[in-house]
Amino acid sequence: MKKLLIVTGPQGSGNHLFSRIFSMHECVGGWKELLDEYWVPSDLEPFAEYWVYPERLTSKAFDGYEYWLANVSVPFVYDGVRQTPKILEMAQQAKQLGIDVTIAIIVRDQNIQAEQQLRVRKEVTLPIAQEYYYNHILTSDFPVFFLDNEALFLHREHYLKYVSRLLSFPIRWYDLDIFKFISEDPNRKYVKHVDSYWLDQQVWHGIQPKSARGLDK
């Protein structure tokens, strides 16, 4: 049975990056244009049409590979119009065609997510994604997993090897080209040094020797 992995996340959560990672494997059909380009418009994703018109999906879309990657952010832009993609309807249509469907939701720190969306989109769309996932995806009968943006950059190939086993989906976790467009953790630019915090003194006092805290008397 052919397998479709639908990867979705709020805008700016790492949709392009995870799509590139899953599409790199030679056994996977997916967003191959991302292997040579850092960013490609969302309405050029191979399955873009079906997020708006899921009834148009046919078995022909799955020719050539046993494994397929489809990606969409929530919301996403199609033909110049912002849309909430019909992920559940598309998954149901694929299932009717005899495709084994798994859904994976990308997770990124909510504060950094909001800052990224304000910088790029001038508004925070995270609640739109959360509402859709809670009301449609996480209440569905499809197996749903979470992909962790922070875990990816912290553990890199070790995390991807784990994800490949978890999803039963081939990943070139050993390929150095996975990070070829990224020179540093994308969260770094949003993180600022904190000189002090009200809890610091209590923590410091707690780790001092007993004698310094007057507890040896």
Image (cartoon, rainbow, N blue to C red):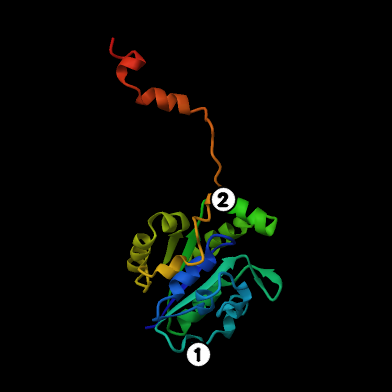
Label 2 and label 1: CA atoms lie apart by 43 Å
For this view, does 34 lie left or right of residue 123? Answer: left
Q: Position of residue 208 (x, y in %)?
A: 35, 23
Q: Residues within 10 Å of mark 2 (few under 14, many from 20)?
A: few
Q: Residue furthest left?
A: 216
Residue identifier under label 2: 189
Quadrant in the picture for the C terminus: top left
Q: Residues within 10 Å of mark 1 (few under 14, many from 20)?
A: few
Query: Is residue 90 in view from this perspective?
Result: yes
Q: Disc 2 marks which amino acid?
A: Lys
Q: Name the one closer to the observer, 72 or 27.
A: 27
Q: Name the one closer to the observer, 100 or 182.
A: 182
Q: Name the one closer to the observer, 164 or 176.
A: 176
Q: Disc 1 marks which amino acid?
A: Lys
Secondary structure under tag 1 reads: helix
Q: Position of residue 139 (x, y in %)?
A: 49, 63
Q: Position of residue 102 (x, y in %)?
A: 43, 71
Secondary structure under tag 2 reads: helix
Residue identifier under label 1: 60
Circles 2 and 1, Cβ within 8 Å, touching? The answer is: no
Image disc number at residue 79 = none
Q: Mark 2 or mark 1: name the one nearer the start of the chain.
A: 1
Quadrant in the picture for the N terminus: bottom left
Give the residue at x 47% y 76%. Answer: 69
